[in-house]
Amino acid sequence: MSYGMGAALQAAVYTHLQADAALNALVGSAIFDAAPPGGIAGLYVSIGPEQVRDGSDYDGGGAVHEFTVSVVTDAAGFQSAKNAGAAISDALVDAPLVLSRGRLVSLGFLRARALRTTDGTQRQIDLRFRARVEDN
């Protein structure tokens, strides 16, 4: 197993989301690879936590990355966040990402969770994806 492709995968996901026209129409440039301190007003996207496990096989080293992309909004309802979530899912599922290290084997959607933040002022949707990468 190698975590060596973690940064390459995150960079490819970030770049791909920034370049997606449908998502850009909804959130503009408010796509971050780390949540902004204190949050921002309006609607934004943040690449969040990940879990990684060994994905090596007889052909060589690899890893399975499960990562979260969050949509956060201060809008009263979930509609704008759900629209952005759909655009993210459409952009990432089976995306032909090119990594600076290794190779993406597959990228799929796992699940989503919509919630109100603890103080009730924001809505958040956490989308969970699974990527299988090889380091050959």
Image: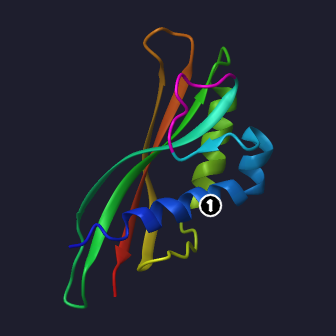
Q: Is residue 10 above or below residue 114?
A: below
Residue at image point 28% right, 66% down = 3
User: SS of the residue at dot 1?
Assistant: helix
Q: How many marks?
A: 1
Q: Quadrant of the N terminus?
A: bottom left
Q: Is residue 88 above or below residue 84?
A: below
Residue found farthest to the bottom: 59
* Residue 54 x, y percent position in the rendering: 20, 68
Q: Quadrant of residue 136?
A: bottom left
The answer to whether residue 37 is magenta is yes
Residue, disc 1: 15
* Residue 73 x, y percent position in the rendering: 63, 25
Residue at image point 28% right, 70% down = 63
The answer to whether residue 72 is magenta is no
Q: Quadrant of residue 134?
A: bottom left
Residue 72 visible in the displayed image = yes
* Residue 45 x, y percent position in the rendering: 60, 40
Residue at image point 51% right, 33% down = 125
Q: Is residue 43 above or below residue 74?
A: below
- Please tell me which residue lies in front, 38 or 105: 38
What is the three-letter code of the residue carrying label 1? Thr
Q: Quadrant of residue 21?
A: bottom right
What residue span does the magenta drawing correspond to?
34-41
Residue 52 as seen in the image, left or right of residue 73: left
